Amino acid sequence: MTVAPGTTRGHDVPGRRTSLTRHLSGAGIVGGFFLVMGGVHLGLVAADTGIYRGFADQALFGFVRTGWREVFMAHPAVWALLLMAGEVTLGTLLLVGGRARAVGWVGVIAFHALLMLFGWWVWAWSIPALAVLVTLAAHDLRPGPASPAHRAT
């Protein structure tokens, strides 16, 4: 494509976000990930709710192991579908933008912090995930007109 001297194409303008970069923002990626994980839980419920049985076996505290066994596993399909609904909600909040995005960031960070109660093995996922999530949220929610949270998505 030939461009006249002194002109730029839309995607070459410094500071201009194209539709591709808008969708590849941290909130877009994390929001999409949470939507996919909601679908994974739906698949697990449809396939075999027994897959959740040993998830809390290595939990750091007895109340987590007991609660998992006596509450979650008493009705695993219901609780797993509620987990799915929570993940889909958080993912959607991140994708919507504005104030909803801020609530979504708080939710996904809290989700990963609480996930750490399930044992040291979860820390291998949660510590790096929290480092990335907090960094992305801080960047996304930085005050100012250039902040993605203040732009319409």
Image (cartoon, rainbow, N blue to C red):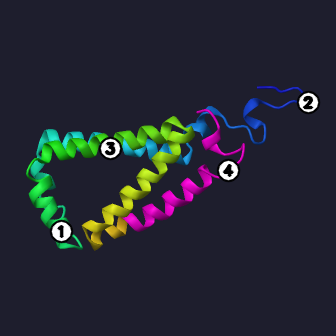
Label ID, residue 143: 4
For label 4, the SS is loop
Q: Earlier in the sequence, mark 1 or mark 2?
A: 2
Position of residue 145 measured from the top left corner of the image (x, y, whole percent): 72, 43
Count of number-bearing discs: 4
Mark 4–mark 1 distance (CA, rounded to whole Å): 40 Å
Residue at image x 76%, y 26%? 1
* Mark 3 Cα shell of 10 Å, populated few (<14), some (14-19), many (≥20): some
Q: Is residue 138 magenta?
A: yes
For label 1, the SS is helix
- Identity of the amino acid at label 3? Gly
Residue at image x 59%, y 35%? 20
20 on left or right of 5: left
Quadrant of residue 135 within the rendered picture: bottom right
Q: Earlier in the sequence, mark 2 or mark 3?
A: 2
What residue is disc 3 on?
Answer: 86
Quadrant of residue 21 within the rendered picture: top right
Q: Earlier in the sequence, mark 4 or mark 1?
A: 1
Q: Main secondary structure of the magenta part?
A: helix
Closer to the eye: label 4 or 2:
4
For label 2, the SS is loop
Mark 1–mark 2 distance (CA, rounded to whole Å): 69 Å
User: Which span of residues is magenta-colored?
Assistant: 126-153
- Identity of the amino acid at label 4? Pro
* Mark 2 Cα shell of 10 Å, populated few (<14), some (14-19), many (≥20): few
* Proximity of marks 2 and 3: CB atoms separated by less than 8 Å: no
Residue at image x 60%, y 50%? 141
Picture quarter with the C terminus:
top right
Q: Is residue 136 magenta?
A: yes
What residue is disc 2 on?
Answer: 5
What residue is disc 1 on?
Answer: 63
